Amino acid sequence: ITDVGELVLTDPLLIADKTDMSEKTVEKLQGRAQLAMVPGIQEKDIILLEEAGVMNRKELADQDPLELGIKINGISKIYVDEGKIAEAERPTIEEVYTWVKAAKA
């Protein structure tokens, strides 16, 4: 596998067979790669999305933007309080809406 596209498109079982990773780990990496391909999503946003139960592009596309925004707002507030992200890094509802819309495209 030489690029993100190959990672996303290759059967996770095949990757697991050829590496020391479990199929579940490969699926998680593929999901992260899918989310990273959505315009506007940064690494910190992927972590927040995973905390909200969104593990890949399809799951993001299936979300109600308002409900997801509420979840992410709560999670990101905790992250700010714990010093994991800055207040300015908290995604806005507009950003969440844009992510969901882009994931559906």
Image (cartoon, rainbow, N blue to C red):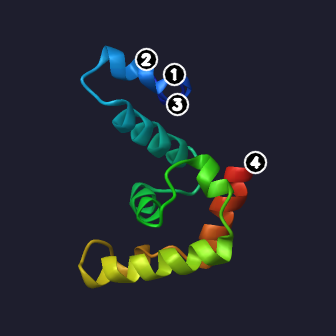
Which secondary structure, mark 1?
loop
Indicate which disc, 3 or 2, sits on the residue closer to the N terminus: 3
Residue drawn at x 38%, y 37% is 24
The reply to whether the C-beta atoms of the residues labelled 3 and 1 are less than 8 Å apart is yes
Q: Residues within 10 Å of mark 1 (few under 14, many from 20)?
A: few
Q: In the drawing, what numbered circle is on residue 8?
A: 3
Q: How far apart, in angstroms, are the residues tagged by discs 3 and 2?
A: 12 Å
Give the residue type that dot 3 points to: Val
Up/down of 105 relative to 4, above or below? below
Which secondary structure, mark 2?
helix
Residue drawn at x 38%, y 30% is 23
Which residue bears the numbered disc 4?
A: 105
Mark 2 or mark 1: which is in front?
2
The reply to whether the C-beta atoms of the residues labelled 3 and 2 are less than 8 Å apart is no
Which residue bears the numbered disc 1?
A: 10
Which residue bears the numbered disc 2?
A: 14
Give the residue type that dot 1 points to: Thr
Give the quarter of the image for residue 34: top right
Q: How far apart, in angstroms, are the residues tagged by discs 2 and 1?
A: 7 Å
Residue drawn at x 54%, y 48% is 56
Q: How far apart, in angstroms, are the residues tagged by discs 3 and 4?
A: 17 Å
Near-viewer residue (76 or 18) = 18
Indicate which disc, 4 or 1, sits on the residue closer to the N terminus: 1
Residue that protrudes farthest toward the right in the picture: 105
Q: Residues within 10 Å of mark 4 (few under 14, many from 20)?
A: few
Indicate which disc, 4 or 2, sits on the residue closer to the N terminus: 2
Give the quarter of the image for residue 21: top left
Mark 4 or mark 1: which is in front?
1
Give the residue type that dot 4 points to: Ala
